[in-house]
Image (spheres, grey):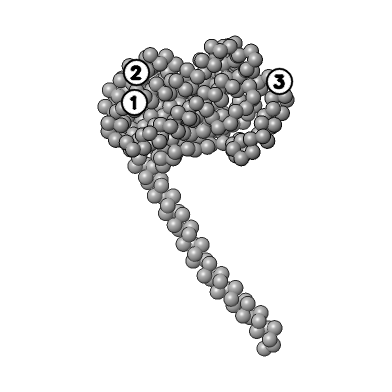
Amino acid sequence: MSLVSRRRSLIGGGAMELLGGLIPLVLGGAGVLLLYQLLQRVRQRAYIQDAVVVITGASSGLGKECARAFHAAGARLILCGRDRARLQELVQELTEAADGKRKTYSPSTVTFDLSDTETVASAAEEILRCHGHVDVLINNAGVSYRGDVLTTRVEVHKEVMGINYFGSVALTQAILPSMVQRRSGHIAVISSVQGKIAIPFRSAYAASKHATQAFFDCLRAEVEQYGVQVSVISPGYIRTSLSVNAVTGDGSRYGVQDKNTAEGRDPREVAEAVLRAVGRKKKDVLLAGLLPTLAVYIRTLCPPLFFKLMASRARKEQRPKED
């Protein structure tokens, strides 16, 4: 055998030995990953099963899908909203959907207007009477906005802030003492990618979500010592009626399904992501597409570029068109 042939044989043998050594490592790594994911799912199921879960804004949109997801996961739901009839319809739907394969509970309902902070304390008392405690509070209720700063009335800013921020704060503060006393609990809030970045013609909405992000970040740090978890979940566009029900600068209803909203993520998919985030005790979750996620990083790492992009967007739009 020639010297060249020997070298080729040695190289080939070495490559085969290396490949043979890598295959067990790859398979072992894949096995560890699968085992980790399995353990995560088991922990998630155990965390949600039998837990008392409160969901605000449960009668429609993402709140309704969250109710379906958490009910199927075995939670003892307390559904909250302004429309008693729609909440009862949802209770009936969930009760009839039970297939017996997994233990589920018939949900309770508490009807109140989250924007009326004076009634939130009494609503919280009613919520606590349902099962004696709350394991998970999901602050989901909210309203969107379309308008320019120049013509938007201050009252509209107050209205949006009242529902999206003060309502969640009031209910959280009313439920929180019972969690601290039990040294157990989980508070989640459905924020928005606009709680991390601000885009033109969304001033009131973005401001309320920025405030939400800040409040619950502070809360997380303060209550960790009491064993209370805090999750901020920030979706991008979701196919719901959020834009249709948005308020405009003069306080009227927007009434239009934006293109970006219509092309957004399926609310069922987002609800499952919320379930995973809560079940796995995630602290901060961004559920947005590539461009919004990239925008968050640009805003953090290169603010001047972000500001130029938003100014260009404002000039192109001239009026609110997208969520």
Task: Give the x, y percent position of residue 150.
Answer: 65, 15
Going from N to C along the chain, the mark reached first, 3 or 2, is: 2
Q: Where is residue 34, by image quadrant?
A: bottom left
Depth order, front residue of 272/152? 152
Q: Amino acid at mark 1?
A: Ile
- Quote the CA–CA distance across marks 3 and 1: 43 Å
The answer to whether residue 49 shows anywhere in this view is no
From the image, tell me which residue sits under label 1.
175
The answer to whether residue 204 shows anywhere in this view is yes
Which residue shows up at 63% across the image and 35% down it?
A: 303
Disc 2 element: helix
Task: Give the x, y percent position of residue 70.
Answer: 40, 33
Which residue shows up at 53% across the image and 67% down it?
A: 22
From the image, tell me which residue sits under label 2.
121
Task: Locate the C terminus and report the quarter of the image it occupies.
Answer: top right
Disc 1 element: helix
Residue 1 to residue 193: above or below? below
In screen coordinates, is 17 left or right of 224? Answer: right
Depth order, front residue of 271/215? 215
Q: Amino acid at mark 3?
A: Gln
Task: Locate the N terminus and report the quarter of the image it occupies.
Answer: bottom right
Task: Give the x, y percent position of residue 305.
Answer: 68, 35
Going from N to C along the chain, the mark reached first, 3 or 1, is: 1
| Residue density around tag 1, few if under 14, some if 14–19, many if 20 or more, within 10 Å | many
Disc 3 element: loop
Residue 15 to residue 174: above or below? below
